């Protein structure tokens, strides 16, 4: 027994619109992940060259990109649910985009981990350098803290 599913043109148009919107959102997210990966790679170079200003700027850009990715994810999730309800058997293009996104996300996380490790190593190195500094006044008394001979009584006569 074979069932034939007939769709109206309106239903087909709705499905196409959902598919196009989801594909567009996933492509936007892929673009943001690529941008994020590029910033992280530049940040790694800045960390290695001890360029503090560049690291700071890249961290601000990184925050904006992560915020954009999170906002996109909030929109993508309901669209994916809608997509699954309309296309229960799936479609070929969306799974490929999801696979690409997963690969990019894995690369971003690995690069982020490398950058964190580099920064941790830099912090340890800087702390060691600070610990090696010698305070020339360490065992000396302050000239202001010494005992001064001052009068204990003041004689006021007229």
Image (spheres, helix red, strand yellow):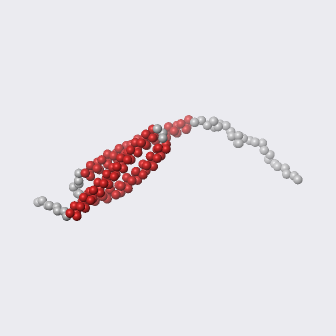
Residue at the location (50% across, 37% down)?
Answer: 125
Front-lying residue, 37 or 130: 37
Residue at the location (25% across, 51% down)?
Answer: 93
Position of residue 119 measured from the top left corner of the image (x, y, whole percent): 46, 41
Residue 24 lies in quadrant: bottom left
Q: Residue furthest right?
A: 158
Position of residue 70 measured from the top left corner of the image (x, y, whole percent): 38, 54
Residue at the location (74% across, 41% down)?
Answer: 147
Front-lying residue, 117 or 155: 117
Is residue 87 left or right of 34 when viewed as pictured? left
Give above or below for 128 relative to 1.
above
Position of residue 9 measured from the top left corner of the image (x, y, whole percent): 20, 63
Can residue 45 be seen here?
Answer: yes
Front-lying residue, 24 or 76: 24
Q: Residue furthest left?
A: 1
Can residue 109 be seen here?
Answer: no
Residue at the location (34% across, 49% down)?
Answer: 31
Position of residue 8 measured from the top left corner of the image (x, y, whole percent): 19, 64
Tell me the quarter of the image containing the N terminus: bottom left
How many marks do you count on the picture? 0
Is residue 63 left or right of 156 when viewed as pictured? left
């Amino acid at each position: 027994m074979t069932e034939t599913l007939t769709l109206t043109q309106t239903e087909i148009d709705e499905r196409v619109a959902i598919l196009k919107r989801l594909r567009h959102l996933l492509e936007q997210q892929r673009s943001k992940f690529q941008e994020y990966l590029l910033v992280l790679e530049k940040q790694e170079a800045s960390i290695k060259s001890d360029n503090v200003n560049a690291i700071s700027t890249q961290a601000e850009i990184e925050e904006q990109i992560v915020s954009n990715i999170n906002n996109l994810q909030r929109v993508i999730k309901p669209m994916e649910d809608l997509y699954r309800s309309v296309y229960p058997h799936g479609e070929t293009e969306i799974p490929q985009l999801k696979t690409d996104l997963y690969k990019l996300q894995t690369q971003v996380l690995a690069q982020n981990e490398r950058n964190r490790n580099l920064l941790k190593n830099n912090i340890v190195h800087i702390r060691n350098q600070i610990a090696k500094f010698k305070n020339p006044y360490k065992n000396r008394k302050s000239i202001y803290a010494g005992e001064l001979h001052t009068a204990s009584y003041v004689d006021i006569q007229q």
